[in-house]
Image (cartoon, rainbow, N blue to C red):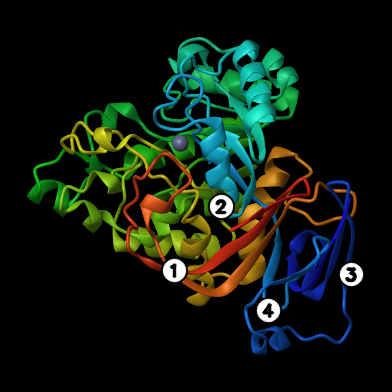
């Protein structure tokens, strides 16, 4: 089985590639990437964004962008236990549609992925029904209760590539210290959901003017910042690998920047909603904009963008958190947190390129290469011999976000009706082609 993608604008930071060229795929692997000498990027702009397939073996990608398949290190696939929200099948289909070929699923399922048997179930199910590569993330503590460490070693052997109690913080510093010691011993990152529950308890939106005027309990940015700094210090103490999940606040960006300057080992991610919208989105009590940590102020959004720009923030992850519509229609206080993010992430992130915040190379780094490096997986690259995980994007294509058309079961998005640019039109997962 051979397939040739021709004349696409290939961006692959792992090999320093940014030019027009061809990619040869053979038996689900990348055989060769060849850049045409002298071909200028500008040329591709003159070409029409149209796709012609001659036979089944050649895809003409003239005028289109070609990236390594995107890697999302933070999704909730909901299976086992919450199949009414999402399944491994629907979630991975949403991933493919959004340009992602690898997703890492958080352990807050039912049962919690705190045991090798659950890890085994997820991996088996993903092989049977999944559309892209799925790596499970194991729980740090049993039942994500924050009390007793889960069996990190056996879960790692079964296939977990990171550990997190995401959705819940590990409040006990001694337990977090032990988890980081394990992370060092097993060479896997601990992904921290940073939230001091004693400060955030009962809060549903950012603490500030809007929480006061709307009569909703607020969560101060300090609830995040305190834990960000605690975890950086514990990583320093133990030599463990800490990755800070869903950074939302200016102060957290400052702390991570400071730590990196000091040479401390820390990596961080943010999500498209934290650089696209502010707490004003919940002024109307729209539960589709209810997330944890909460949307914050314009000042925070600007700081997140600067953090992405200067590489303080390494990764853009979706925190894809599908919910059933009925749940999001509950009263704001009662509605669950989260956004169905896989199918809007690329378009929202490309806005940063349009606005000059990120280069295209940086975008591919943050959405493919960096998460792969943090997790130690051979993904996010078009190197010969790698899985043929590729996304071909029509960068000029404008479209309106319509949750109704999501492949995800979760239609919960605050971006309904937004006009975005840049649509994946072919996604290859281990050489298997999906066309949209
Ligand atoms: Zn999450």
Is residue 233 visible in the rendered structure shown here? Answer: no
Q: CA distance from mark 3 to mark 2?
A: 26 Å
Residue at 49 percent across and 47 percent down: it is 318
Q: Secondary structure at mark 3?
A: strand
Q: CA distance from mark 1 to mark 2?
A: 14 Å
Q: CA distance from mark 4 to mark 3?
A: 17 Å
Cβ(mark 1) to ligand 1 < 8 Å?
no
Give how far apart the Cα atoms at labels 1 and 3 are: 31 Å
- The tag earlier along the polypeptide, 1 or 2, is 2
* Mark found first going from the N terminus, 4 or 1: 4
Residue 393 at x, y percent in the picture: 62, 66
Residue indicated by mark 3: 34
Which comes before the other along the chain, label 4 or label 3? 3
Distance between mark 2 and mark 4 Cα atoms: 20 Å
Question: Residue 15: x percent and y percent?
Answer: 83, 62
Task: Say whether residue 356 is left or right of residue 50.
Answer: left
Give neighbour class at mark 1: few <14, some 14-19, many 20+ (Cα, 10 Å).
Answer: some
Residue 71, compared with residue 53, is above or below; it is above
Which image quadrant is residue 10 in? bottom right
Report the disc number at residue 399.
1
Q: Secondary structure at mark 2?
A: helix
Q: Residues within 10 Å of mark 3 (few under 14, many from 20)?
A: some
Q: Which mark is residue 97?
A: 2
Q: Residue at x 20, y 31 (%)?
A: 334
Q: Is mark 4 within 8 Å of ligand 1?
A: no
Q: Is residue 265 left or right of residue 55?
A: left
Where is mark 4, residue-wise?
63
Q: Secondary structure at mark 1?
A: strand
Q: Residues within 10 Å of mark 2 (few under 14, many from 20)?
A: many
């Amino acid at each position: 089985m051979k397939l040739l993608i021709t004349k696409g604008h290939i961006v692959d930071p792992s090999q320093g590639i940014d030019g027009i060229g061809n990619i040869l795929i053979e038996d689900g692997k990348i055989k060769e990437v060849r850049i045409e000498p002298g071909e200028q990027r500008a040329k591709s702009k003159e070409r029409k964004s149209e796709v012609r397939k001659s036979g089944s073996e050649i895809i003409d990608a003239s005028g289109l962008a070609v990236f390594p398949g995107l890697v999302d290190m933070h999704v909730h696939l909901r299976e086992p236990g919450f199949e009414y929200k999402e399944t491994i099948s629907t979630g991975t289909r949403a991933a493919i549609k959004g340009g992602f070929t690898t997703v890492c699923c958080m352990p807050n399922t039912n049962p919690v992925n705190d045991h090798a048997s659950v890890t085994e179930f997820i991996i088996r199910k993903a092989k049977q029904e999944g559309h892209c590569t799925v790596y499970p993330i194991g729980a740090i503590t049993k039942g994500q209760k924050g009390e007793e460490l889960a069996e990190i070693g056996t879960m790692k052997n079964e296939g977990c590539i990171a550990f997190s109690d995401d959705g819940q913080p590990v409040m006990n510093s001694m337990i977090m210290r032990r988890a980081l010691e394990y992370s060092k011993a097993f060479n896997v990152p601990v992904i921290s959901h940073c939230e001091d529950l004693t400060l955030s308890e009962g809060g549903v939106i950012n603490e500030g003017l809007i929480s006061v005027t709307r009569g909703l309990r607020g969560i101060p940015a300090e609830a995040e910042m305190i834990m960000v700094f605690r975890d950086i210090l514990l990583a320093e103490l133990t030599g463990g690998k800490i990755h800070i999940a869903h950074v939302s606040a200016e102060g957290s960006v400052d702390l991570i920047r400071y730590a990196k300057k000091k040479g401390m080992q820390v990596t961080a991610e943010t999500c498209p909603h934290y650089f696209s919208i502010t707490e004003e989105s919940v002024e109307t009590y729209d539960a589709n904009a209810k997330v944890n940590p909460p949307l914050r102020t314009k000042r925070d959004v600007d700081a997140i963008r600067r953090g992405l720009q200067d590489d303080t923030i390494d990764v853009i992850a979706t925190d894809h958190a599908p919910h059933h519509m009925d749940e999001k229609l509950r009263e704001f206080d009662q509605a669950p947190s989260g956004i169905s993010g896989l199918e809007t992430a690329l378009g929202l992130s490309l806005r940063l390129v349009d606005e000059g915040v990120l280069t295209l190379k940086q975008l591919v780094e943050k959405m493919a290469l960096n998460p792969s490096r943090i997790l130690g997986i051979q993904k996010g690259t078009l190197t010969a011999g790698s899985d043929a995980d590729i996304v071909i994007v029509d960068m000029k294509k404008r479209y309106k976000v319509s949750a109704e058309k999501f492949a995800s079961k979760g239609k919960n998005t605050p971006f309904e009706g937004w006009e975005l640019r840049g649509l994946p039109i072919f996604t290859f997962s281990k050489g298997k082609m999906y066309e949209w």
